[in-house]
Image (tube, rainbow, N blue to C red):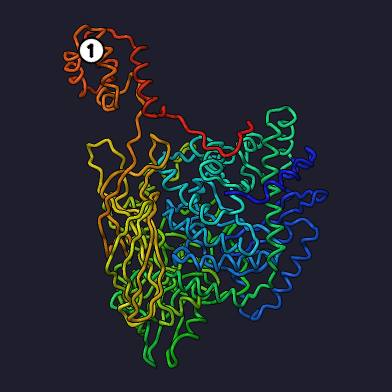
């Protein structure tokens, strides 16, 4: 990546005083950068929110930006339908904005174009509010459904995560608003998040937790990246030179601004040396420590200059984009329609026994709606992602408007307003259910137990909700459950109800989206972005979550999400990529075309049902399990490598093309400390979910040469003798030392191959001599040089910039 503004930014930084440089990297108040007006660099305003703006005017310093905020408030007050604003869902003092589905829900659409549309709408509202940077999207993997901020992130899979994030980022930046890709990296729990050490082995780190960031950066080049609070393998991420200079700047050639999470830096001098450019928010003590470190030469001024250059280049980039791209007044009615559309596309029909949905009640029939969530919907999670919505569709109102004429629709709360058991309300709801044709239950997880700095205590719904549903199953055979929840939940009654619709935190359009799906005006097309477990104990992270004594061990390694369920042969409640439709699709005619560096995958998708519908076609790479007695790298049995979201009319067929790159066939080789492609026979699989593979074909892969392992006197002889040249060198040396001759030495050496001891101890024992260990080491070092082997623990320098430290 090359930043066209770096050269100009460098010239500006060369004119700055030390005070201006320190001010530039230390922020201004809670939400701004510090500008350098005399050199033409304005302050930049940042706002929270991946699914909508969260901006509190009282928290922003009084300056010219308030003119923009006032204009934005005027636009809100003249929105087309203020009567639909419900005070029960308005949050705090934040400016009202469109509340889109949480990213965990948006991911269920598997639609990059839709993600781009949402990003574009967010940018328009940001620009109108005078903001230049949106602090999102968040893309930490949903490793455990317990994680409090799981609803802010896309998926358990890095490919789906990276692609959807790139769509949102391009939507934002195409309209002149910088994105902040966060939280880099391995912020997968809210427990002790400022001090917890995420301990992650190398393959899992690169293949899973960094992969989503790498893919999003390659496809969208976000203008900023935000570091996380946690430590990673013992080092705070905000001051981790391997992570920031080695991986982000070096391997990936990232050229934007690296910024901290709010108060995420504990040692600012170390952070600047490691490559963190911007400390947010302003903190006088941290600034003072940095100034002292620079003056005392503990931080080279060159490191400070690099940070300032990145920030200045970002400022120039934003100024250029906003000059070229006109500000458009937000059309909140259109944005609300987009929120409805996104919710409709992302709700997942998990179960639909006997095609109970869509509902087609006859005139005179009675429908019963149960649940406080039908009147007071939980449309989003808590914390920095919370939005004060301009409008909110109330599900019960939408159901009444959408239901066919002549249908009686009755509502019962079922439980208390706090979600807890209420014996009278439960009894009234059960009694009403006896005379209803169909019962629709709006069930949810306990309110306000999941969010920033708050992991979930368990994976259950509100106990009162589970209890009432269980009682309903004893008396009724047409029960439809609509779920609102932050992440996967356990459903002990899942097999006893007729339909389950997962809405998650679906945003302000939730009510109408659900009504349209239930009555068949919208064909559901969402697919799960995580695996749903039958019980908490089935989750991959169960034994290592949330850590103890300051360490969070990622014990499951590369086997996260569906990879774990597959390798352990655990039946999930609902698999990754699962979702039902009101139409049917068939897959046929899989063809593979191998090129020099990629493989084209082609097949035909047909809509064989009676409705227009979207289908998410998923491309997986299948591998045979590694034999348990072979010391070879293990791989997932199946791993997502691509997807295509296709809309077809009834009877329509379409040829779908996807491409696998050579990198898609690779794993992270810890000997090379780099990516490598193994030579093997793999399976190319096309599925409607990770457990519903419709087509497959074998593919022979020509692999990279096996990476040489580092040899030393403790290496077992069987490994050492496999390295070209080692046997000849040893035979020549040992024949001279022992006087046994070449043939005798070769015979004796062959018997050493099966020894589990180190080669030095084995040779001494076999030849009956105390051999020269220095000479043996020289022979092995010569072999290491010839083979290019790397000593364990050695990390190659991938930095694209001079390390000023």
Q: Is residue 328 left or right of residue 146?
A: right
The residue depicted at 69 percent of the width and 44 percent of the height is 309
- Is there any visible trace of residue 75 in the rendered image? yes
Q: Which residue is mark 1?
A: 765
- Comparing 462 with 56, the one in front is 56
Classify residue 577 by image quadrant.
bottom left
> x, y percentage for residue 633?
31, 40
- As displayed, is residue 242 above or below residue 489? above
- Is there any visible trace of residue 424 in the rendered image? no
Q: Secondary structure at mark 1?
A: helix
Q: Residue furthest right?
A: 38
- Comparing 649 with 781, the one in front is 781
> x, y percentage for residue 34?
75, 49
The C terminus is located in which quarter? Answer: top right
> x, y percentage for residue 347?
44, 70
- Comparing 36 with 380, the one in front is 36
- Comparing 436 with 614, the one in front is 614
């Amino acid at each position: 990546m090359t930043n066209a503004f770096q050269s100009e930014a460098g010239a500006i930084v060369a004119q700055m005083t030390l005070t201006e440089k320190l001010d530039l990297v230390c922020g201004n108040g809670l939400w701004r950068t510090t500008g350098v007006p005399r050199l033409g660099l304005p302050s930049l305003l940042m706002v929270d929110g991946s699914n909508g703006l969260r901006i509190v005017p009282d928290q922003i310093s009084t300056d010219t930006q308030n003119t923009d905020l006032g204009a934005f408030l005027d636009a809100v007050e003249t929105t087309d339908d203020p009567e639909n604003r419900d005070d029960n869902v308005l949050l705090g003092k934040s400016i009202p904005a469109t509340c889109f589905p949480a990213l965990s829900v948006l991911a269920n659409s598997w639609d990059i174009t839709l993600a781009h549309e949402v990003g574009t709408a967010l940018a328009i509202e940001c620009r109108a509010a005078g903001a230049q940077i949106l602090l999102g999207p968040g893309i930490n993997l949903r490793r455990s459904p317990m994680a409090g901020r799981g609803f802010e992130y896309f998926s358990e899979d890095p490919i789906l995560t990276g692609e959807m994030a790139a769509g949102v980022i391009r939507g934002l930046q195409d309209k002149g608003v910088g994105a902040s890709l966060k939280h880099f990296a391995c912020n997968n729990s809210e427990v002790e998040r400022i001090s917890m050490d995420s301990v992650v082995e190398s393959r899992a780190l690169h293949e899973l937790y960094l992969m989503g960031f790498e893919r999003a950066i390659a496809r969208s080049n976000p203008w900023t990246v935000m570091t996380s609070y946690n430590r990673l393998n013992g080092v705070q991420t905000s001051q981790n030179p391997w992570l920031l200079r080695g991986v982000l700047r070096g391997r990936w050639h990232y050229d934007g601004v690296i910024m901290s999470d709010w108060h995420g830096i504990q040692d600012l001098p170390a952070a600047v040396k490691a490559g963190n450019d911007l400390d947010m928010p302003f903190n006088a003590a941290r600034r003072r420590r940095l100034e002292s470190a620079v003056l005392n030469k503990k931080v080279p001024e060159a490191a400070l200059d690099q940070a300032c250059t990145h920030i200045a280049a970002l400022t120039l980039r934003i100024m250029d984009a906003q000059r070229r791209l006109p500000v458009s007044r937000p059309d909140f009615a259109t944005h609300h329609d987009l929120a409805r559309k996104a919710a409709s596309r992302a709700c997942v029909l998990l179960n639909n026994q006997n095609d109970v949905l869509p509902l087609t009640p006859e005139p005179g029939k009675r429908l019963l709606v149960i649940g406080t969530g039908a009147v007071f919907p939980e449309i989003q999670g808590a914390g920095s992602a919370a939005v004060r919505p301009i409008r909110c569709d109330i599900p019960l109102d939408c159901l009444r408007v959408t239901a066919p004429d002549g249908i009686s629709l009755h509502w019962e709360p079922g439980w208390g307003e706090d979600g807890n058991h209420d014996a009278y309300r439960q009894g009234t709801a059960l009694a009403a259910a006896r005379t209803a044709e169909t019962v629709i239950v709006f069930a949810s997880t306990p309110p306000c137990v999941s969010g920033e700095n708050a992991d979930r205590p368990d994976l259950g719904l509100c106990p009162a909700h589970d209890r009432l549903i269980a009682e309903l199953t004893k008396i009724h055979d047409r029960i439809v459950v609509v779920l609102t929840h932050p992440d996967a939940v356990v459903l002990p009654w899942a097999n006893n109800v007729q339909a389950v619709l997962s809405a998650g935190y679906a945003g302000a359009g939730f009510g109408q989206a659900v009504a349209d799906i239930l009555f068949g005006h919208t064909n559901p097309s969402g697919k799960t972005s995580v695996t749903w477990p039958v019980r908490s104990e089935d989750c991959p992270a169960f034994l290592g979550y949330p850590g103890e004594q300051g360490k969070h061990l990622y014990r499951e390694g590369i086997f996260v999400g569906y990879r774990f369920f597959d390798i352990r042969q655990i039946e999930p409640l609902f698999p990754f990529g699962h979702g039902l439709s009101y139409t049917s699709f068939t897959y046929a005619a899989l063809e593979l075309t191998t090129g020099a560096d990629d493989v084209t995958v082609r097949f035909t998708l047909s809509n064989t049902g009676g409705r227009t519908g979207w289908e998410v076609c998923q491309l997986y790479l299948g591998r045979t399990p590694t034999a348990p007695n072979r010391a070879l790298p293990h791989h997932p049995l199946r791993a997502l490598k691509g997807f295509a979201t296709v809309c077809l009319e009834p009877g329509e067929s379409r040829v779908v093309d996807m491409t696998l790159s050579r990198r898609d066939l690779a794993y992270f080789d810890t000997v090379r400390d780099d990516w490598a492609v193994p030579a093997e026979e793999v399976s190319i699989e096309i599925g409607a979910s990770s457990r519903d593979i419709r087509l497959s074909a074998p593919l022979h892969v020509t692999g990279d040469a096996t990476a040489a392992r580092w040899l030393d006197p403790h290496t077992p002889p069987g490994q050492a003798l496999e390295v070209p040249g080692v046997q000849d060198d040893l035979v020549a040396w040992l024949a001279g030392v022992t006087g046994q001759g070449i043939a005798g030495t070769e015979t004796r050496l062959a018997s050493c191959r099966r020894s589990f001891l180190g080669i030095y101890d084995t040779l001494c024992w076999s030849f009956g001599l105390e051999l020269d260990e220095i000479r043996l080491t020289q022979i092995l070092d010569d072999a290491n040089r010839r083979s290019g082997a790397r000593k364990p623990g050695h990390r190659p320098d991938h930095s694209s910039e001079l390390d000023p430290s």
